[in-house]
DNA sequence: AATTGATGTAACTATTGACATTACATCTTC
DNA sequence: GAAGATGTAATGTCAATAGTTACATCAATT
């Protein structure tokens, strides 16, 4: 399993919501068209972001809005909102502890240290990226293509 | 997709091969029993490790052996041997570049920087773990349970 | 209050990928 | 040549992901 596309879609939605703020009412249908996804999929992602306290989604009328400072929202927060077990689920160890082999009985513990190192590295990398930095990059890219 | 169990099985095999060196002839059947996996799966893993120059597997007779210093074999080498696109495949971005929305057209580029950061972090974490360090941890664990 | 358009969810389907298994050709040693 | 091992293609199985349909609920407008 990978860092699912849900994560990239979520970032997409958050940037969209930020850019549309005060301009348009952002509905799941609109986001579905922009992301090439499905309104139901979008709603489930927005629901997760909502539970994490990153956005508000008024019921009935729609119109999602950020409810936190983009500079304070990290990629790790976004990812964690979507994936219950977070970084842990990125890694799998084959089950074999019941085997009569000493390697089999200890491989799990042997792998724990290096795998934890990887998880921590991923978390740190995600925490070092904020929504604001991605919005800034987005603006720079739009500016570039406007000049071309 | 995740760092597949192939990777943990591969480490399992390499430790097994190291420990059995000079004691027993390590066949895919033996490794399958120890890992709780299947001889064919083991053979495909050994084949990848062989191509990466980490082990030798004599045809016909079997008896895999390390052909590199465990202190020089990193987890990243092991993982890269198994997964063709390495760390890149850990991450997915939804396809939407053909959409008429500026966010859709730029989201791929916006995500490249943070995702590259994650990949680099994973690679570094993997490179900092050697087979030797895992073998050492394994020995310590065996020693512990012998004392208990 | 009826209509419209939106969200919140459950349920189902389709697809993909990982792993397991079968089968068989090939190779080495005895 | 027989036995046992590897190399590999082909198939089966299962879980996870994404897409879709359906419908209850809600808020604003008329």
Image (spheres, coloured by chain):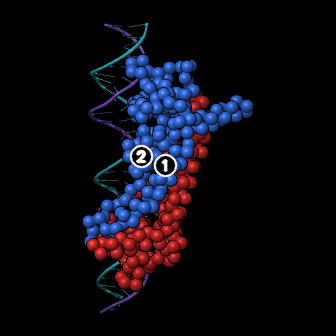
Chain colours: A red, B blue, C cyan, D purple
Q: Are circles 1 and 2 on residues that touch, CB within 8 Å?
A: yes
Disc 1 to disc 2, how far (Cα)? 9 Å
Q: Chain of mark 2?
A: B
- The disc placed on residue B86 is 2
Q: Chain of mark 1?
A: B
Foreground residue among D29 and A96: A96
Q: Quadrant of residue B104?
A: bottom left
Residue A130, position in %: x, y? 49, 68
Q: Is residue B54 visible?
A: yes
The correct choice, above or below, for A53 with respect to B119 in the image is below
Q: Is residue A108 visible?
A: no
The correct choice, above or below, for B30 with respect to A54 in the image is above
The correct choice, above or below, for A75 with respect to A28 in the image is above
Tell me the element at label 2. helix
x 35%, y 63%: residue: B108
Tell me the element at label 1. helix
x 43%, y 32%: residue: B53
x 42%, y 67%: residue: A11
Residue A80, position in %: x, y? 51, 62
Foreground residue among D26 and C19: C19
The correct choice, above or below, for A84 with respect to A93 in the image is below
Residue A60, position in %: x, y? 40, 80
The residue singled out by tag 1 in the image is: B123
Left or right for C21, reference C23: right
Q: Residue furthest front?
A: A147
x 56%, y 19%: residue: B23
Foreground residue among B66 and A33: B66
Left or right for C12, reference A65: left
Q: Which of the two labelled residues, at mark 1 and mark 2, occupies the earlier sequence position?
A: 2
């Amino acid at each position: 399993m990978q860092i699912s596309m849900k994560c990239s879609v979520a970032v997409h939605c958050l940037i969209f919501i930020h850019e549309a703020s005060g301009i348009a009412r952002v509905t799941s249908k609109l986001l579905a068209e922009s992301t090439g996804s499905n309104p139901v999929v979008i709603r489930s992602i927005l629901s997760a972001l909502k539970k994490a306290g990153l956005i508000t989604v008024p019921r009935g009328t729609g119109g999602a809005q950020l409810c936190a400072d983009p500079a304070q929202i990290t990629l790790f927060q976004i990812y964690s909102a979507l994936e219950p077990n977070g970084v842990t689920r990125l890694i799998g160890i084959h089950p074999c502890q019941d085997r009569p082999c000493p390697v089999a009985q200890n491989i799990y513990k042997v792998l724990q240290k290096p795998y934890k190192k990887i998880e921590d590295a991923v978390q740190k990398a995600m925490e070092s990226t904020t929504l604001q930095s991605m919005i800034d990059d987005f603006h720079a890219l739009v500016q570039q293509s406007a000049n071309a």
